[in-house]
Amino acid sequence: MSNPNPKIDHLTPWKPGQSGNEAGRPRKMVSQVLKDLEGAGIENVTKQQVIGCIETLLNCTQDDLESYARDKGHSVLIRMVARHLLKSGDNEKILSMLLDRAFGKPDIKTEHSGEVKILKWDEEEGDPAEYIQQTLNR
């Protein structure tokens, strides 16, 4: 009985773990990509630039934001922040996130007054919940 597809008679299956393209496409190293970007005049964005972008775009009109979000002539940072500000639905969460990035999260301070009891429990004390309740009621 002959093979119904004679075009594949000469093919042999790959061994397990073997690839048909062992060398594969060479990967560009991150350092090379960074050199290429630097050569093209693209600089690293600084923390201050990110903060400035957020602070400035927060003061834009809806029309301005829509323009910035669409214009491919602007940096990806400006377009992304503008798009996030334009998103409907969870604006409070987005605004909170952007403000936290720009100004930092507010410090949350808690005060404690009163007695601190350190509880030491071992298995001989019995049920831990009962031990805690009895100790706190003393």
Image (tube, rainbow, N blue to C red):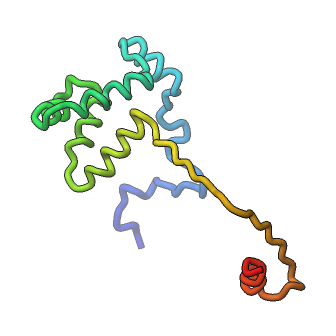
State the image coordinates of residue 136 (x, y, percent, origin top left): 73, 77
Identify which residue is drawn at 54% across, 55% down.
Answer: 14
Q: Is residue 16 above or below residue 125?
A: above
Nearer to us in this view, 64 or 129? 129
Nearer to us in this view, 92 or 20? 92
Query: Which quadrant is the N terminus positioned in?
Result: bottom left
Q: Image check: 19 left or right of 127?
A: left
Identify which residue is drawn at 40% across, 57% down.
Answer: 8
Query: Which quadrant is the C terminus positioned in?
Result: bottom right
Identify which residue is drawn at 86% across, 78% down.
Answer: 122
Q: Is residue 103 above or below residue 130?
A: above
Q: Is residue 135 above or below residue 63?
A: below
Classify residue 79 by image quadrant. Answer: top left
Q: Image check: 59 left or right of 125?
A: left
Classify residue 102 by image quadrant. Answer: top left
Q: Is residue 2 above or below residue 42?
A: below
Q: Residue furthest left?
A: 63
State the image coordinates of residue 104 (x, y, percent, origin top left): 45, 37
Q: Image check: 81 left or right of 61?
A: right
State the image coordinates of residue 53 (x, y, percent, origin top left): 31, 27
Nearer to us in this view, 96 or 121? 121
Identify which residue is drawn at 41% across, 37% down.
Answer: 101
State the image coordinates of residue 100 (x, y, percent, origin top left): 41, 40
Give the number of callouts: 0
